[in-house]
Image: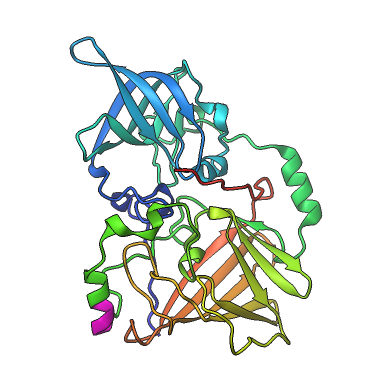
Amino acid sequence: MNTVRGIALLTLAAWSDGLLAHHSTLGVYDVNNVIEIEGTVTQVRWQNPHPTYTVAVAGDNGETVDWRVETGAISTLRLRGLEQSFIKVGDPVRMAGEASNRGRPELFARNLLLPDGREVLISASSKPRWSGGDPARLFQPRFDPTNAAQARREADGIFRVWTSVFGDADSFPLYGADDYPLTERGAALKAAWDPRTSPYLTCGTKGMPYVMVTPYPIKFERRGGNIALRFEEFDALRIIHMEGAERPDDEPFSPQGYSSGRWEGGTLVVETDRIDSPHLYGDGTPQSRAMRTVERFTMSTDESRLDYQLHVEDPEIFTRPMDFDRYWAWRPEIALQPFGCEL
């Protein structure tokens, strides 16, 4: 059985930062044109899917130019131990990132240099630019220790918050690929895809199985005899109907579909059908109502890791089944937060 593995490519700017994710910036920024600006922060707008900042930069002729700067989502910044106050109005800053394709003073920032010389990584795919990775020159994450203490008290097997590990392609992969085994219909649909009409340009929940590519925290909770899988991204929710619950024959199609779960030893196995979602992934790869998935969630013995396997079948779009995998880590200092998307 062929396995498609995602590789985090810097040139693709990785999911959570918008190129192929919740709020697409495809076509807005030039990933091949990384520039630096230096100026003073004059406005802060702290929001998902991307915080925005206005930075006053001295122009070549002595005039001041207001630059509009986007960074990784609030959820990304929180996972890096950053809160709103890490950039304030009046702060002098140096930023590096992708320049606008529209000829405007706009930047998608990946790196920030503070006046004291510390570098801040401000997107999920950021790599050190000025610090060389020296911990003494990198902004160190700050977390509320009370969150970790409470999480340790409440953790019960799989029922806890799980997070992606930035920088590890096995945990934080890009599943988009050019070599999906597409049927003639699937290839035609993908060729006709226009990113300007993508549903992911707005604030809205992704369907199955795309929702499982989320870079942000997820949480398993008990809901009576069933399991709720909550996502920080778009405040999405999946209900997994456990053993004994049969899918009604008239169950409507929906973006998340209908999920039935069972335990096989310590592994949670989830089968999902009745899915009505346009894309397997945010690069325009289509899917149809014939889509069926099988997922396996297995927690490590030391409870620090949750391994995930996804089996996908859609004979109308793909010539063969496909398998994907990733993992989440348990970081008890991380809590599920409201997403509160605004555009």
Depth check: give the residue in front, 233 or 323: 233
Q: Is residue 274 above or below residue 283?
A: below
Residue 190, percent across and down?
26, 71
Coloring applied to the structure:
rainbow
Q: Nearer the viewer, residue 249 or 98?
A: 249
Counting from the top left corner in percent of width and height, residue 181 is at: 29, 80
Judged left or right of residue 101, residue 155 is: right
**Residue located farthest toward the right when viewing the structure as drawn:** 153
Q: Is residue 11 above or below residue 272?
A: above
- Residues 139 and 78: in front is 78
Whether residue 178 is visible to the viewer of this picture, yes or no, is yes
Q: Which residues are magenta?
A: 183-187
**Residue drawn where x is 23% and y is 32% of the image:** 104
Q: Residue at x 32, y 86 (%)?
A: 319
Q: Any magenta on residue 300? A: no
The image quadrant of residue 117 is top left
